[in-house]
Image (cartoon, helix red, strand yellow):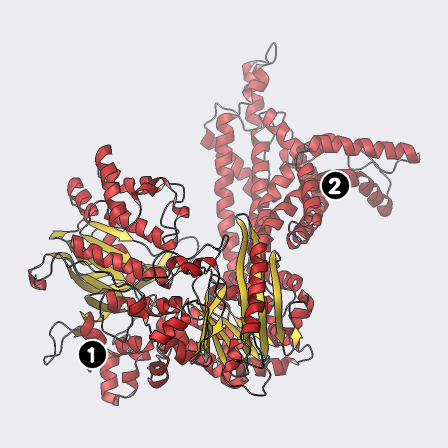
Amino acid sequence: MIKYILKRCFNYVIMLFIATSMTYFLASAFMDPRSNYMSRHPHPPIASINRSLDLANINDQTPVIVRYGRWLTGIVTRWNWGLSPEQSPINGAIAPRILASVQLVTVATVLSIIFGVSIGVYTAIRQYKWQDRTLNSIATFFLVIPTAVLGLVIVYLAVSMNNGIGQRIFYVTGLHSYSGGNPFAWFLDLLQHLVLPTIVMTIPGTVSYHLTQRTYLLDTMNADYVRTARAKGLPLNKAIRRHALRTSLIPTAVDVAFSIASIFTGAVITETVFAINGLGSYFVQAIGDNDINGSVAIAAFGGVCTLTGALLADIFSAWLDPRIRLS
Amino acid sequence: MSNAMEATTDRSAFRSTTPSAVTAAPAAPHAATSHEGEAPVLSVRDLNVSFASEAGTVRAVRGMNFDLYRGKTLGIVGESGSGKSVTSMSIMGLLDSNAHVEGSITWHGEELLTKNDLAMSKIRGKGIAMVFQDPLSALTPVFSIGDQIKESLVIHNPHMGERQIRDRSIELLELVGIPEPEERLKSFPYQFSGGMRQRVMIAMAIANDPDVIIADEPTTALDVTIQAQVLDVLKKAQQETGAAVIFITHDLGVIAGIADDIIVMYTGRPVESAPVDDIFAHPAMPYTMGLLGAVPRSDRERSGRLVPIPGSPTNLVDLPKGCPFADRCPLAIDICRQREPNLEAIPGRPGQFAACHRAGEIVEKGLTFSDVYQVSEGVTSKFAGVAREDRAVALDVQGLVKTFPLTAGGFLRRKIGEVHAVDGVNLEIREGETLALVGESGSGKSTTLSEIMSFTKPQAGSVTIFDTPVDDHVARAKRRELRGMVQYIFQDPMSSLDPRLPIYDILAEPLRAQHKSREEIRVRIEELMTLVELNPDQVDRFPTQFSGGQRQRIAIARALAVSPKLLLLDEPVSALDVSIQAGVINLLEDLQNKLGIAYLFVAHNLSVVRHISNRIAVMYLGRIVESGSTAEVFLHPKHPYTQALLSAVPVPDPAIERRRARTVLQGELPSPSETFTGCPFAGRCPLFVSLSKEAQQRCLNERPGLTARADTDPDHLAACHWV
């Protein structure tokens, strides 16, 4: 098992290196940081533009392979992911945003999985009964509401609640407003900020896991081996939970694993509604600014997330299904 | 609903009109086989099951009655849709929630139909256990065998200790004949073959010493050799537990050797029931006669054409007013179409009951199958009178080899070995004859067919079709001509026809590929439909509107469209019901006689093979171990494998089944990736065990060639040192 994981990790590092390098070449080919300066009126002297671009190692007049060499050396020797066109270091910009995103995303993801899978199982066992129909209708309703609208509705409700009570329970912008040294107060403050964005992100997540898990379980629920389990003397619900659920969790595990990267970068709407400086907004901004180094760094982070997810999915599937473990 | 009412009144009428036959349980024919004083373990009375479907109410079971006694085996026989499985599922309480069940099922006097799922689960697995048809999907893939056996024990004995559970599990696995049970407890289902998994299913079924075991087609998905093993295990399990067994099957051969009493079902209704000897010796209901007569026998030389039951099975949604079999019955008279007959005792035949208005007449006149069904005239062969040597060779295969690489590793796959799927096969088929290729699954039959069909140069050896060697460099035009000469017919007519194409387009496709004109295609399609005995006006219908047998006829018509000279048939009748099968076999025979086509026929059903083929080749692990004319090989099988294979085929005659000694092969087909220096069959060979040490060494070290013995038919070859 350990050997299998190590082998996988080694493969992943190679894949990650290839993917990131390709992103670097693609970004260098398509993004044009020079235009940031040339679009100004009047534009700065060409020599000074070149100097600025050279400082950030993004000058299109330098051969791309030379720039790639410098960029790679910087990462490998100094863990330096380069500068943005405005000469600000990528490392300094990306680290706090990853932290903010982790705070924002983690709870919502975990809750989505727990609620989504539970409701999926609950409705699958009661297929076409009123509970199933009701929950499916609710799911469909939330499925068609855009995140931005959902976010604004929740902000509106929270503000009315704050006003009604006359005290600020929910914060609707940012992640922190406490600046003292008490860790409990800091944590409480974080929670007050996190509750609303978490709700906004949990609902669509729950809905999608509910609908897919319901389908997966329905597929395995009528399998011959569930019938065998019932013939052995297990009541219907127990037979489903013990024999059908386990196999039906494998595709969900794979879904979760491969969505980790998009959870981070896809939270951009929630980040915008709640004015949180997370990874999603940074990604959009980097592309808009022709920030080659920033975009590549985010792509690399996304790659790490995806591959970590894939590894977790492999381990989880192997744990659920012995046929995988031994091959 | 009015139908249901009618059926109910019919049954009560029946009860009052048959008071004398059985006193203990008037509605249960089975009480007749002398069980004085003994109470039945299980009683089914007036069982009616219906399902709501989009097409209307499906009346799956109507008026089922029987009593089951300790240690006895009741066989329920019927084709698909006859209600046999639904009956067993209603006993288990495992029907879908949309099923509507009426009547009464009592187990030790306890009514089961009123119990809810929780109450039933106390009885399931403890009092009544079940073995299902498909062992490959019946075990949970993610739990070990040990865990699954443990579960069946713990559900009903929550206080059993780990030690006790382990001991009992090992004991159970030993009982069902699984070697090294301690080790095997840790194995997962995917590490077991189909036969082994069915043994595990039986072990779980008998874990709590149930007094009723229901086996629903337990051997249908298995090879004949494995079927014989599993039937033995089932008999042994019954002896150990003293349980009553309900054995459900469509195969009359299987049931002849195992059942005490038999109920024949048709469209959800029991149509005949009797002790096993009576039903096989003198059936009284035309449907039973048809079932028995329509199957070819592996123990008899082919005597003539098969006699199919005309028509196709009755639709369960709108059942006709009278006897549901009337439309297919050669003896049907007016009353048959007006009133459904009841299952009534036959005078002078104690214990035998039949649902037929003319049963009395049939018994009185002693009518048999050949009196009831019309034997139609066959077509004389185009090549009648032409000696085999004078006919052209349609297919000549010499030393054909096909291997598959075995790979390992993740990123870069490396080859670690080879599977010899086909290993030096020689075949020769001449015009107008049928060569049957038989063997267990995994023996390489289908791979041989697909290699011939691929029209590429084989890895080694040669394939020659009518004097044209198949090579990668054959000219385009020649290749198209070759493709037209050879056609393929698949096993399952449900999946081999595109459900979204009307029959016309299905039949036109191969003709368009041959660039035929529109008019030519139209004429040819009409010809084809007539040739396969379908109504040419139905070409605008879709495959789903036809029954299984009709669909296989369409598949045959499609294969014949381009006038091939050689047909490769991969299990063409094994997906069809018994009553349909005979018609398709007859059609294949007529077509061969009319058109002079050569057939390469792959089948596992040796009875069908004996009937239809002129020559036979027995395959084992990718090699041919015996070949010769069908009559000769069946009469004097030489190779121990052929002998075992033939002896494993059950014969639909209880007297013979009880008498004959069966060579049950030990073990299973070894993995094709294993390499053998000597004879690959040695590990399972019944002859090998009886040989001297030196002789055994020869088997293990020297590979036997396919040779004929000097003093016998030079055409009859076998690959064994000792024949």
- Name the amino acid type tagged 2: Thr
Locate residue A147, reporting x and y percent: 69, 33
Residue B383 is left or right of residue B516, and the answer is: left
Q: For marks 1 and 2, give the one nearer the viewer.
A: 1
Q: Nearer the viewer, residue A161 or B382?
A: B382
Observer-nearest of B64 and A48: B64
Q: Is residue B623 above or below residue B452?
A: below
Relative to B75, residue B117 above or below: above
Which chain is disc 1 placed on?
B
Q: Identify the residue shown where x is 56% and y is 67%.
A: B11
**Residue corresponding to mark 1:** B636
Do the residues marked 1 and 2 share a common chain? no
From the top left corner, tell me how far across and down residue B265 is, in percent.
46, 67
Quadrant (top left/top right/bottom left/bottom right) for the C terminus of chain B: bottom left
Residue B435: % across, % down: 21, 63
B163 left or right, relative to B719: right
Quarter of the image for the N terminus of chain B: give it.
Answer: bottom right
Task: Give the residue furthest to the right.
Answer: A166
Image coords of residue A221 (percent x, y): 58, 57
The total of numbered circles placed on residues is 2
Q: Callout 1, which amino acid? A: His
Label 1 crowd (10 A; few <14 / some 14-19 / many >=20): few
Image-based side of A129 in relation to A13, left or right: right
Residue at 61% over, 29% down: A286
- C-alpha distance separating marks 1 and 2: 80 Å
Residue A323 vs residue B433, the one in the foreground: B433
The quarter of the picture where residue B275 lies is bottom left
Q: What chain does mark 2 sit on?
A: A
Is residue B637 in sight in this rendering? no
